[in-house]
């Protein structure tokens, strides 16, 4: 129940999922501050309408946001605005959770557990040099790729299992498909290996943690949108 973890008065931050204007090339990064006003049910709450100085920010009904709630233990979830009104001289937004609450760690992106096929390889020297210099380059064609499985993904990186072990600190090319809005799109990203360890129960298989390097804004937004849509599907399944 929401009331077990969240209480009125806690500070809230909202960030838009995707773009407010699909025709605009600039990603929406605005963060809005608010407070929890009341808990209505297991998946709905009231929050105060955000303000900038003395100006109310009229966030749109049906707008979808990544929300962080700051209590003794911060929590994170995805929400959709379903109503807005004035009550007792307070301007209110009614929000509905479209994902489960998860413990939030500052500076981390929302991580989504999954099972996605991926193909990868270590970057060759010329590619590594270009990435480190943040220079334009083309991937060397025809090099063999190793199959792996992504087990969780976020806007900041991913974790995957592979029979190929990559050295921590090395750069790799990752290729996988994400289905968003009914359309499958290819994602090609470069990542830095943060850690690699052999699985205790599966010899010869390695778990890797990866941080994206020089990730394009559009690719990051596409990943976050995919996570949001999958969380919403899971939430609907859980509710029957």
Image (cartoon, rainbow, N blue to C red):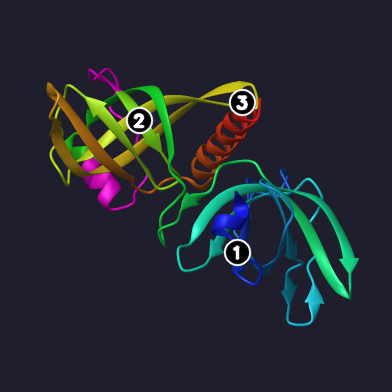
Q: Residues within 10 Å of mark 2 (few under 14, many from 20)?
A: some
Residue 226, horizontal then vertical, whole percent: 55, 34
Residue in the foreground of this view, choosing between 148 and 21:
148
Q: Which residues are magenta?
A: 128-148
Q: Which label belongs to residue 151?
A: 2
In the rendered view, tell whether residue 218 sits above or below residue 178: below
Per the model, the C-alpha gap separating discs 2 and 1 is: 28 Å
Per the model, the C-alpha gap separating discs 1 and 3 is: 27 Å
Q: Which label belongs to residue 13?
A: 1
Q: Residue at x 40, y 23 (%)?
A: 116
Residue 174, horizontal then vertical, whole percent: 33, 30
In which quarter of the view is residue 115 placed? Answer: top left
| Residue assigned mark 3 | 237
Q: Residues within 10 Å of mark 3 (few under 14, many from 20)?
A: few
Q: Earlier in the sequence, mark 2 or mark 1?
A: 1
* Residue 186: in magenta span: no
Q: Residues within 10 Å of mark 1 (few under 14, many from 20)?
A: some
Residue in the foreground of this view, choosing between 71 and 142:
71
Q: Is residue 27 visible?
A: no
Q: Residue at x 52, y 53 (%)?
A: 76
Q: Secondary structure at mark 2?
A: strand
Q: Earlier in the sequence, mark 1 or mark 3?
A: 1
Q: Earlier in the sequence, mark 2 or mark 3?
A: 2
């Amino acid at each position: 129940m929401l009331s077990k973890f969240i209480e009125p008065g806690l500070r809230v931050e909202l960030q838009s999922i995707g773009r407010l204007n699909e025709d605009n090339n600039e990603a929406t990064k605005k963060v809005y501050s608010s407070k929890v006003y009341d808990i209505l049910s297991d998946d709905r709450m009231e929050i105060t309408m955000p303000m900038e100085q003395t100006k109310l920010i009229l966030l749109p009904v049906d707008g979808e946001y990544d929300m962080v709630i700051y209590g003794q233990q911060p929590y994170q979830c995805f929400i959709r605005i379903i109503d807005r009104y004035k009550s007792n001289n307070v301007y209110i937004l009614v929000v509905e959770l479209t994902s489960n609450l998860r413990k939030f760690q500052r500076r981390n992106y929302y991580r989504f557990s999954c099972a996605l096929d991926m193909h990868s390889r270590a970057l060759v020297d010329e590619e590594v040099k270009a990435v480190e210099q943040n220079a334009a380059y083309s991937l060397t064609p025809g090099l063999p790729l190793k199959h792996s499985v992504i087990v969780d993904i976020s806007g900041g990186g991913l974790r995957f299992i592979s029979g190929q072990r990559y050295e921590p600190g090395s750069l790799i090319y990752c290729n996988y498909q994400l289905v968003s809005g009914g359309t499958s799109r290819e994602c090609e990203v470069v990542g830095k290996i943060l850690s690699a360890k052999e699985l205790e129960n599966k010899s010869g298989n390695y778990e890797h943690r990866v941080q994206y390097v020089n990730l394009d804004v559009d690719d990051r937004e596409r990943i976050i949108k995919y996570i949001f849509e999958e969380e919403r599907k899971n939430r609907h399944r859980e509710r029957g």
